[in-house]
Image (cartoon, rainbow, N blue to C red):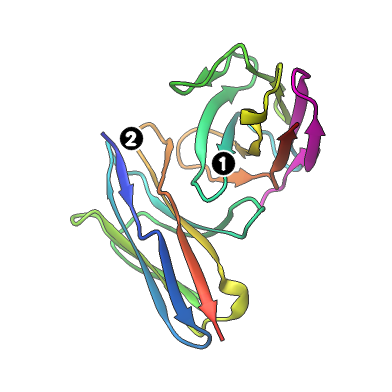
């Protein structure tokens, strides 16, 4: 299957700082990328869907100004958590899909964010 | 609304067989996925069903009945490394994945 990478794999930051997480599709062009958040012992929660070159579509309840998503190229999407607070501590997972319709989603390894 | 139900937790014995059920109610259906997720890791793909019936892949099999909105994941010859959460996800009419809460499977020696 296709490979999706995330960087960093874990990050610890102070409250009030911003953190950027990168998601890359390594061997395919990702028309669509998805950002998920997962709290301990809970399932994946879709935060937003982004298509290359256009604005991300955020799920209800997700603050656009706090979670900035940039899908600048067909192989890179970034999620920036601005002014992070301890309640933002979570496991962030991206996934990428090559096209619309029946294309499979491939998941990155996830980024563990801890805000002190 | 859209809803996917699966048991929260199951326990099984090493070497045995376990069946994890998933029922769904979604707006449209374009396939059902099963993923395995170990603690602290991202989900990994296990199986995909879009037509009724059983799909077998080694020790893992997945069954789908679209008329009943029902699927199950069958794991045979359980190994300790199978201890993980198993996520059922349905792709709806917009090709969005709708996720279940996951079933935590505990394997005992």
Callout 1: residue from which chain?
A: A
- Magenta extent: A1-23
- 3D distance between C-alphas at marks 1 and 2: 24 Å
Q: Confirm whether residue B75 shows in the render.
A: no
The residue that disc 1 covers is A38
Q: Residue A2 in the image: x percent, y percent?
A: 68, 49
Viewer-proximal residue, B82 or B104?
Answer: B104
The residue that disc 2 covers is B93
| Residue A79 image label | none
Viewer-proximal residue, B50 or A24?
Answer: A24
Q: Residue A91 in the image: x percent, y percent?
A: 64, 41
Look at the numbered disc 2 and give the secondary structure of its residue. Answer: loop
Q: Is residue A31 magenta?
A: no
Q: Name above or below for residue A23 compared with residue A108.
A: above
**Residue lying at 66% horizontally and 53% vertically, measured from the top left:** B41
Task: Please state, as top left, top right, bottom left or bottom right, where the C terminus of chain A lies in the image.
Answer: top right
Q: Is residue A17 magenta?
A: yes
Bin the neighbour count of mark 1 within 10 Å (Cα to Cα): few under 14, some 14-19, many 20 and up.
many
Q: Residue A76 in the image: x percent, y percent?
A: 74, 28
């Amino acid at each position: 299957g296709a490979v999706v990478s995330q960087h960093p794999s874990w990050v610890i930051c102070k409250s009030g700082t911003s953190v950027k997480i990168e998601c890359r599709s390594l061997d395919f062009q990702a028309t669509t990328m998805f950002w998920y958040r997962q709290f301990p012992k809970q399932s994946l929660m879709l935060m937003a869907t982004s298509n290359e070159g256009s604005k991300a579509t955020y799920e209800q309840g997700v603050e656009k100004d706090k979670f900035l998503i940039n899908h600048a190229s067909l192989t890179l999407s970034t999620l920036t958590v601005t002014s992070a607070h301890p309640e933002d501590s979570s496991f962030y997972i991206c996934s990428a899909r090559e096209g619309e319709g029946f294309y499979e989603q491939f998941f990155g390894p996830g980024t563990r964010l801890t805000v002190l | 609304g859209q809803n996917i139900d699966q048991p929260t937790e199951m326990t099984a014995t090493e070497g045995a067989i376990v069946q994890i059920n998933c029922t769904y109610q979604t707006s449209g259906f374009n396939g059902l996925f099963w993923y395995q997720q170990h603690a602290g890791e991202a989900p990994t793909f296990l199986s995909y069903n879009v037509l009724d019936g059983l799909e077998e892949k080694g020790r893992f099999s997945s069954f789908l009945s679209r008329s009943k909105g029902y699927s199950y994941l069958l794991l045979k010859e359980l190994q300790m490394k199978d201890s993980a959460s198993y996520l059922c996800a349905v792709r709806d009419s917009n090709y969005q994945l709708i996720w279940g809460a996951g079933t935590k499977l505990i394997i005992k020696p």
